[in-house]
């Protein structure tokens, strides 16, 4: 069975929109600034991007606020580049658009309720699938309610995340809410490597766990 090349599928959609002279709107669920750095650098060339910071999996509020502040700092820098048309050292052109933000309230209770009974699942297992379902469901719902042309997530940039499952979940949620999902596999074409380069350039706060208390527990255990 041949696997879907989600990166190529995204390229095809972007090429089609460009041929038709359109700059569609995109609601992008972001997990953190390091992961979104490459995604935003790429997508702002082709879409009117609105960042959705919806991450109820982040168990500690201080950690949530720190990651959110870094995301906003990165967006501010990217928007400054557009305003000044200064893309020195960036893979960007004068086609790049400003990035908007749609914020969500801190809501760790929603995540805890969703994963109840899955506390002992291994990282990458059923608990993560429920987390993807929660975050992409919210994104699809807001995309439909606010008339976005597409929605997607930065989560596929991580080598530790299952891109097939994320894309399948996104498509299922698109059908559920009447939105259009943009397929992606942002780690392809050295996307993950580029995110590390951009994180270093902007001095972004990086973490060794996804944000939930379970991944933090496992990261601390593995460090012993």
Image: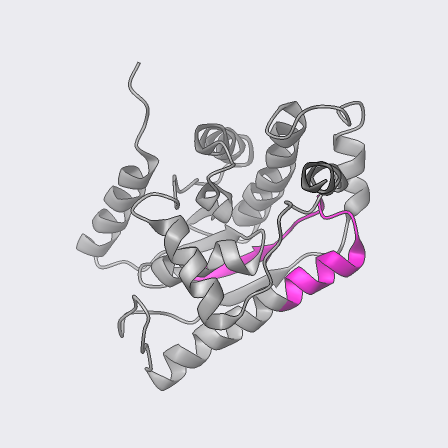
- Kindly tell me whether residue 40 is visible in this rendering: no
- Residue at image coords 38%, 78%: 82
Q: Quadrant of the C terminus?
A: top right
138, 82: nearer the viewer: 82
In magenta segment, residue 72 = no
Residue 65 lies, with reference to residue 29, above or below; the image says: below
Residue 170 lies, with reference to residue 143, above or below; the image says: above
Q: Quadrant of the N terminus?
A: top left
Residue 88 lies, with reference to residue 43, above or below; the image says: below
Count of number-bearing discs: 0
Q: Quadrant of residue 204?
A: bottom right
Whole-percent x and y of residue 158?
Answer: 48, 43
198, 146: nearer the viewer: 198
In magenta segment, residue 64 = yes
The coloring applied to the image is one colour
Whole-percent x and y of residue 46?
Answer: 31, 59
Name of the residue lying farthest toward the front: 224
The span picked out in magenta is 49-69
Name of the residue lying farthest toward the left: 19
| Left or right for 171, reference 15 | right
| Left or right for 209, reference 196 | right
Residue 185 lies, with reference to residue 100, above or below; the image says: above
Name of the residue lying farthest toward the top: 1
- Residue at image coords 68%, 56%: 104
- Kindly tell me whether residue 52 is visible in this rendering: yes
Q: Quadrant of residue 127?
A: top right
């Amino acid at each position: 069975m041949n696997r879907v090349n989600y990166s190529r599928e995204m390229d095809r959609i972007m090429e089609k929109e460009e041929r038709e002279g359109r700059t569609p709107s995109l609601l992008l669920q972001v997990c953190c600034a390091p992961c979104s750095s490459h995604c935003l650098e790429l997508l702002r060339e082709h879409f009117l991007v609105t960042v959705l910071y919806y991450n109820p999996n982040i168990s500690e509020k201080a950690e949530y606020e720190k990651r959110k502040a870094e995301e906003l700092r990165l967006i501010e820098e990217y928007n400054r580049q557009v305003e000044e048309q200064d893309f020195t050292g960036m893979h960007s052109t004068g086609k790049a658009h400003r990035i908007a933000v749609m914020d969500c309230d801190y809501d760790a209770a929603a995540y805890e309720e969703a994963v109840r009974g899955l506390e002992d699942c291994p990282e990458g297992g059923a608990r993560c699938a429920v987390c993807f379902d929660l975050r992409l469901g919210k994104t699809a719902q807001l995309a439909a309610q606010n008339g976005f042309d597409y929605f997607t997530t930065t989560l596929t940039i991580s080598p530790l995340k299952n891109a097939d499952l994320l894309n399948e979940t996104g498509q299922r949620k698109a059908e559920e809410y009447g939105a259009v999902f943009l397929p992606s596999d942002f780690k392809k074409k050295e996307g993950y490597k580029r995110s590390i380069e951009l994180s270093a350039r902007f001095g972004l706060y990086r973490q060794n766990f996804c944000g939930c208390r379970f991944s933090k527990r496992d990261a601390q255990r593995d460090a012993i």
